[in-house]
Image: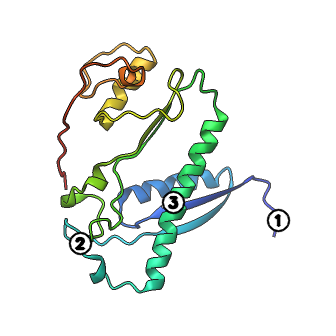
């Protein structure tokens, strides 16, 4: 067998093998295979379409202790992978002239309410607490803001930061005033709904 001359790329893939995104993700893996000797560590996450919107009590899922430990290890590995990638990104850019935004589409309940569900009718607080980290010039590392923000605020934030002219109004608000500590009147509530 001939040795590959392509660089090796190690990847951990977390897949529920039902979500359409996983199929899109597989197309991305195929593109990576064209350039890299791809080594994939598959971490499968079971999601069942028959699960009620409120989730299923953990005790009723029927997993033995070994299965729970494996799923827990995969969840922790995912968190470590994301933290490692974010740290590497922050170490590789000049934060004096770069804006970095780390965000997610939802928080992670991971059974925190006695049921296994992240979205749907559960609408748990843990699911609504979406991670948002921003690093940019003028914002001291470790700064924390407690105002209510939304993913809808990201597009106007990027547009203002990049100096792009707005062709239309955004549903969200730029976060730059929050980052600069120059905001006096900010929202006091957000509306969320279950689209499932």
Who comes first in sequence, dot 2 or dot 3? 2
Q: Position of residue 185 (x, y in %)?
A: 24, 20
Who comes first in sequence, dot 3 or dot 1? 1
Q: Residue at x 33, y 85 (%)?
A: 62
User: Height in image: 136 above or below 83?
Assistant: above
Determine the secondary structure under disc 2. loop
The picture quadrant where one finds residue 169 is top left
User: Height in image: 187 above or below 64?
Assistant: above
Structural distance between the alpha carbons of marks 3 and 1:
33 Å
Residue picked out by circle 1: 2
Q: Badge 2 local density, few (<14 within 10 Å), some, or many (20+)?
A: few
Residue picked out by circle 2: 51
Who comes first in sequence, dot 2 or dot 1? 1
Q: Nearer the viewer, mark 3 or mark 1?
A: 3
Q: Nearer the viewer, mark 2 or mark 3?
A: 3
Depth check: 3 or 129 in front? 129
Q: Position of residue 164 (x, y in %)?
A: 41, 15
Image-based side of 192 in relation to 21, left or right: left
Residue picked out by circle 3: 78
Q: Residue at x 30, y 54 (%)?
A: 127
């Amino acid at each position: 067998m001939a040795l590959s001359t392509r660089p090796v790329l190690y990847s951990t893939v977390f897949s529920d093998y039902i979500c359409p995104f996983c199929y899109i993700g597989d197309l991305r893996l195929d593109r990576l295979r064209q350039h890299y000797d791809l080594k994939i560590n598959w971490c499968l996450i079971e999601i069942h379409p028959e699960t009620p919107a409120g989730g299923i009590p953990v005790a009723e899922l029927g997993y033995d202790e070994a299965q729970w430990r494996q799923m827990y290890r995969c969840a922790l590995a995912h968190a470590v992978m994301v933290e490692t990638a974010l740290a590497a990104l922050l170490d590789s850019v000049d934060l004096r002239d770069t804006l970095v935004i780390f965000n997610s589409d939802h928080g992670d309940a991971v059974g925190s309410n006695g049921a296994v569900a992240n979205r749907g009718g559960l609408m748990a607080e843990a699911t609504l607490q979406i991670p948002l980290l921003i690093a940019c010039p003028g914002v001291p590392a470790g700064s924390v803001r407690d105002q209510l923000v939304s993913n809808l605020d990201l597009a106007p934030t990027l547009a203002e930061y990049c100096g792009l002219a707005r062709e239309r109004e955004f549903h969200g608000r730029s976060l730059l005033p929050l980052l600069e500590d120059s905001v006096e009147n900010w929202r006091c509530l957000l509306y969320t709904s279950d689209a499932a």
